Image (spheres, grey):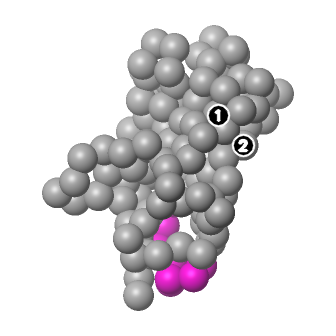
Amino acid sequence: QVQLVESGGGLVQAGGSLRLSCAASRSIFSSNTMGWYRQAPGKQRELVAIITNGGTTNYADSVKGRFTISRDNAKNTVYLQMNSLKPADTALYYCYARLGDIWGRGTQVTVSS
């Protein structure tokens, strides 16, 4: 049973933008802190951004000023707007729900130089 479904990944040139979406069931999304993590080949999974139900956000230093996390509570969806993308942002991006420790299957983001 897939509970978090990511979309929006793809191939983009350096300097470009992508918007990731993560659709969740209402039972998971409601009152939950949601986040995005990423894992590049040969590296550990790392936090990209997180947002509480009240809208408080936190970002990895490497993406501050370039990425924006947001949520639409009516649609049970969390977004990650990624601007000024760099080749170092290339990774598999995972959606995460803190309560329940639930992970999506990931969506690939590839940034070419």
**Marked residue nearer the N-terminal end (1 or 2):** 1
Crowding near the residue tagged with mark 1, few <14, some 14–19, many ≥20 C-alpha atoms within 10 Å: many
Q: Position of residue 97 (x, y in %)?
A: 52, 25
Q: Which residues are magenta?
A: 9-16
The residue located at (53%, 60%) in the rendering is: 63
Is 15 in the magenta? yes
Residue named by callout 1: 51
Q: Residue at x 62, y 18 (%)?
A: 32
Is 65 within the magenta?
no
Q: Which mark is residue 102?
A: none
Position of residue 55 in the picture relative to residue 108 (left or right): right
On the image, numbered disc 2 is attached to which residue?
Answer: 70
Whether residue 6 is visible: no
Circle 2 residues within 10 Å: few <14, some 14–19, many ≥20: many
Tag 2 secondary structure: strand
Query: For the point 60% across and 24% down, which residue is it?
Result: 33
Spot occupied by residue 71 in the image (x, y as percentages of width and height): 73, 37
Quarter that holds the N terminus: top left
For the residues marked 1 and 2, what is the alpha-carbon distance in whole angstroms?
7 Å
Name which quarter of the figure residue 17 lies in.
Answer: bottom right
Residue drawn at 51 percent across, 42 percent down: 36
